[in-house]
């Protein structure tokens, strides 16, 4: 476990954001299903991406990383047999691949670690057995699947996780017949599903949006494609909030026209009162006076909640974050752990059933924030140091390896003062 101590300082300068983890997961799977040779770049080898690469290797793909380029040769992909798929702590890897493995006719043994074995997969446990796939589990991981997925109508809620919708969208074109996805409740994190559809289209597979959800024609074929990965808006948000706290920060490598829902951070930072300039591949953020609290519907942007709560603490007045109940089933219960981390630093955050109420006072005292082995809590706590009067200690700092291994290096390049005080 690694603990860091951060001395408060304004950040200033230019940072290039890593490749989107969400985009990369999808591209790796689509490239694998093309049963040809593809390159994907640039990639950031976070733990979650390494989990997806490991799993496509278990499907029979051959992968090689040179620099920031991943080459995938899936010309000899398995179409039968049994594979073990270690998803580590990656919910995307698990939920995307369960239906894909079944669509290929492979029996799967899915395992994971951390909180992943307890994270919900019940939607698949209800759906897949009615479409030809046997599931053996005690409720989570390990999960064993057997049988070939069959086409048909798949009815599921849209407010548990969009990852279930993405997993089905990736798998259903491989089936012999046509399929429908029927959403029984409004779809949250719709931007991530739009990203899936866009990536599939680049690999030659078409999905039709309908009034009930999605229509997926069967007997489609993924075609090989060399893919360029988008920059990650979820990671950009941390440094954009840092810029709103008084330094001038230019975040490079992000596309303002991206399908990533987290690009909404631009509008939210403006509402808080920061100054933003948006270019073709960058966003510049600087402070233009006191920030003011706002109301935030987090239904489409759950990953932004920890750093938005920090932004609310650096503003004056009340920031209300709602429609965020799904955060309770992430790497940690992020409503609880965000609340505790900020309050331990002297903030005033109240946890409610579906969100947070932040009483902003412009500054925090500092102190010790528990990272709870959650990458987004660790990074949000680091950003909180900027508005703290005293040093901030953050535990479980190694959790950044899940998504942004170079976060603290970039933090230092912008003027952050970070010291490792414990490493065991």
Image (cartoon, rainbow, N blue to C red):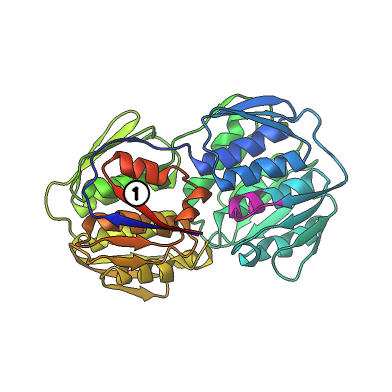
Q: Identify which residue is drawn at 31% across, 71% down.
A: 343
Rendering coords of residue 46 (x, y %): 54, 44
Residue 360, visible in the rendered structure: yes
Q: Identify which residue is drawn at 54% across, 36% down.
A: 198
Number of numbered markers: 1
Q: Identify which residue is drawn at 33% across, 28% down.
A: 280
Using a 10 Å C-alpha cutoff, classify the residue at mark 1 as few (fewer than 14 neighbours), some (14 to 19) or many (20 or more): many
Tell me: residue 11, above or below residue 332.
above
Q: Is residue 53 magenta?
A: no
Residue range highlighted in magenta: 86-96
Q: Assign a secondary structure to mark 1.
A: helix
Specify whether 311 is left or right of 187. left
Rendering coords of residue 57 (x, y %): 73, 39
Q: Viewer-proximal residue, 259 or 218?
A: 259
Residue 252 found in image quarter: top left
Residue 298, visible in the rendered structure: no
Residue at numbered disc 1:
238
């Amino acid at each position: 476990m690694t603990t860091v101590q951060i001395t408060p300082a304004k950040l200033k300068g230019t940072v290039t954001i890593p490749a989107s983890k969400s985009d990369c997961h999808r591209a790796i799977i689509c490239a694998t299903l093309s049963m040809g040779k593809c390159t994907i770049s640039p990639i950031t080898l976070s733990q979650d991406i390494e989990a997806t690469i490991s799993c496509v290797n278990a499907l029979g793909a051959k992968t090689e990383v040179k620099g920031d380029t991943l080459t995938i040769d899936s010309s000899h992909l398995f179409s039968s047999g049994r594979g073990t798929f270690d998803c580590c702590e990656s919910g995307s890897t698990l939920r995307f691949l369960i239906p894909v493995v079944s669509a290929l006719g492979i029996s799967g043994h899915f395992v994971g670690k951390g909180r992943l074995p307890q994270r919900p997969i019940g939607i698949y446990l209800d759906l897949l057995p009615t479409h030809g796939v046997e599931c053996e589990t005690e409720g989570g991981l390990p999960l064993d699947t057997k049988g070939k997925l069959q086409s048909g109508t798949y009815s599921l809620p849209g407010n548990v996780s969009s990852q279930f919708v993405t997993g089905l969208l990736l798998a259903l074109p491989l089936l012999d017949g046509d399929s429908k996805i029927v959403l029984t409740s409004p779809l949250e994190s719709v931007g991530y599903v739009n990203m899936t559809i866009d990536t599939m289209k680049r690999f030659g597979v078409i999905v039709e949006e309908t009034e009930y959800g999605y229509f997926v024609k069967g007997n489609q074929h993924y075609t090989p494609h060399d893919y360029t990965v988008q920059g990650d808006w979820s990671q950009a948000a941390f440094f954009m909030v840092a810029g709103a706290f008084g330094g001038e920060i230019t975040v490079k490598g992000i596309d303002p026209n991206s399908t990533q829902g987290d690009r909404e951070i631009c509008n939210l930072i403006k509402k808080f009162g920061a100054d933003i300039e948006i270019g073709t591949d960058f966003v510049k953020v600087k402070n233009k006076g006191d920030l003011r609290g706002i109301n935030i519907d987090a239904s489409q942007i759950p990953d932004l909640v920890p750093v938005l709560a920090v932004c609310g603490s650096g503003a004056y007045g009340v920031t209300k974050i709602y429609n965020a109940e799904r955060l309770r089933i992430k790497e940690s219960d992020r409503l609880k752990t965000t609340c505790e981390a900020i309050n331990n630093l002297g903030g005033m955050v109240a946890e409610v059933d579906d969100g947070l109420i932040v009483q902003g006072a412009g500054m925090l005292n500092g102190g010790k924030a528990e990272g709870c082995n959650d990458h987004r809590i660790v990074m949000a706590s680091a950003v909180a140091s900027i508005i703290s009067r005293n040093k901030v200690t953050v535990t479980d700092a190694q959790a950044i390896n899940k998504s942004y291994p170079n976060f603290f290096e970039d933090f230092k390049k912008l003027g952050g003062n970070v010291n490792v005080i414990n490493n065991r």
